[in-house]
Amino acid sequence: MNNNSFLLSAKGICIAVFLSLNTVVYAQKTAGISAVSEKTLSTILEKNRAFYTQGKVADYIPELGKMDAKAIAFSVVEKNGKVLNVGDVQKKFTMQSISKIIALMIAVNEKGEANVFEKMGYFGTDKPFNHFSNLETTGKPLNPMMNAGAILTTSLISGDGEKPFQKILDMVRYITKNQTIDYSKSVYESEKSTGHRNRGMFYLMKNNGLITGNEDQLDNYFRQCSIEVTAEDLAKIGYFFANECVRFDGDSQYKNTEVAQLIESQMLTAGMYEFSGEYTRTVGLPSKSGVGGGITVSVPGKMGIGVFSPALDQHGNSAAGYHMILDFVKQYHLSLF
Ligand code: GLN
């Protein structure tokens, strides 16, 4: 062997060693990332359980005030559709604003994105979910995630009386493959009898010509907010939008890349209301919260996450829920950024 060929083969060995080392490191990394277990979820849950003391259960809808502040649950649906649950997995709570992403999907499937967004914006917000003073200035809701835009969105779903609500309920049942899901009559009655601010928005938008129907349409919004789910149901909803509207078991009857992108982009820009910017910085994933204490998260192309803990922070987002998501996302490097 002359000097040159010796050097060449030494170089070859070095490259081979380098490449195989890289493969080992990559394999270790991906093994770590895919190895989500109920044990890991449980550790994260226990670490963050006490955060409920920093929040407050919503009581502006009187029935919601009856929730057990200490209840907590954490669910993940992995890429292959496997479901992992820890905590109070049987505990049901109302979807509240998380129902807005389902209503948006149905309205856009029926009317087309352009017709829906002719009536409202794609804006983010620096204001809470029930803010609506811009209806007086720009005349249109900021986005379909805040109450004004969501009430308008539901009014755009076709059908008389309760039909639009029934479509939302059926879609939640389909996505979660859980036909037992229903709405809480007591939470619905409670919100209907106290939701004067939402009623005010409804009539302002009727005055602006954005809404043409009667108060049945507002009732459908109150009903959709009262749909009862578990953290597991929320993880399945997160999975659905993360995977082009394909269900966790692979059923692709609603597969639609465009609609999934639209919903995820709305979740990212406005799903956590005025906290959305900071949330995108820290968590970096499309997410939607509700004042019932749930948050659903989509990890695009991968998994769905559902958390529940009813004590809310000052933005109306679950305090412990946020911290569980934050830890999980850091541990598995799930941020989009
Ligand atoms: N039903 C609630 C309301 O309209 C929904 C708000 C929320 O979950 N952020 O006030």
Image: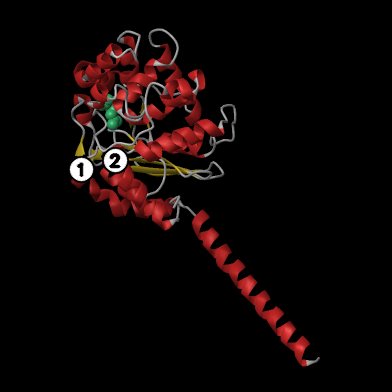
Residue kind at label 2, given as amino acid type? Ser
Residue drawn at the location 33% of the way across and 12% of the way down: 209
The spot of residue 277 in percent (x, y) is 32, 45
Residue drawn at the location 40% of the way across and 35% of the way down: 266
Identify the secondary structure beneath mark 1.
loop
Beta carbon of the mark 1 residue lies under 8 A of ligand 1: no
Q: Are marks 1 and 2 in contact (CB under 8 Å)?
A: yes
For residue 177, above or below residue 11: above
> Extreme front residue here?
137
Tell me the number on the disc at residue 228. none
The spot of residue 318 in percent (x, y) is 28, 41
Question: Number of labelled discs?
Answer: 2
For residue 163, above or below residue 182: above
The spot of residue 285 in percent (x, y) is 41, 45
Can residue 49 be seen by looking at this rendering? yes
Residue kind at label 1, given as amino acid type? Gly
Residue drawn at the location 33% of the way across and 19% of the way down: 221
The spot of residue 54 in percent (x, y) is 19, 46
Looking at the rendered image, the quarter that the N terminus falls into is bottom right
Identify the secondary structure beneath mark 2.
loop
In the rendered image, which quarter is residue 132 located in?
A: top left
Mark 2: give few (<14), some (14-19) or many (20+) Cα within 10 Å.
many
What residue is disc 1 on?
A: 55
What residue is disc 2 on?
A: 309
Beta carbon of the mark 2 residue lies under 8 A of ligand 1: no
For residue 122, above or below residue 71: above
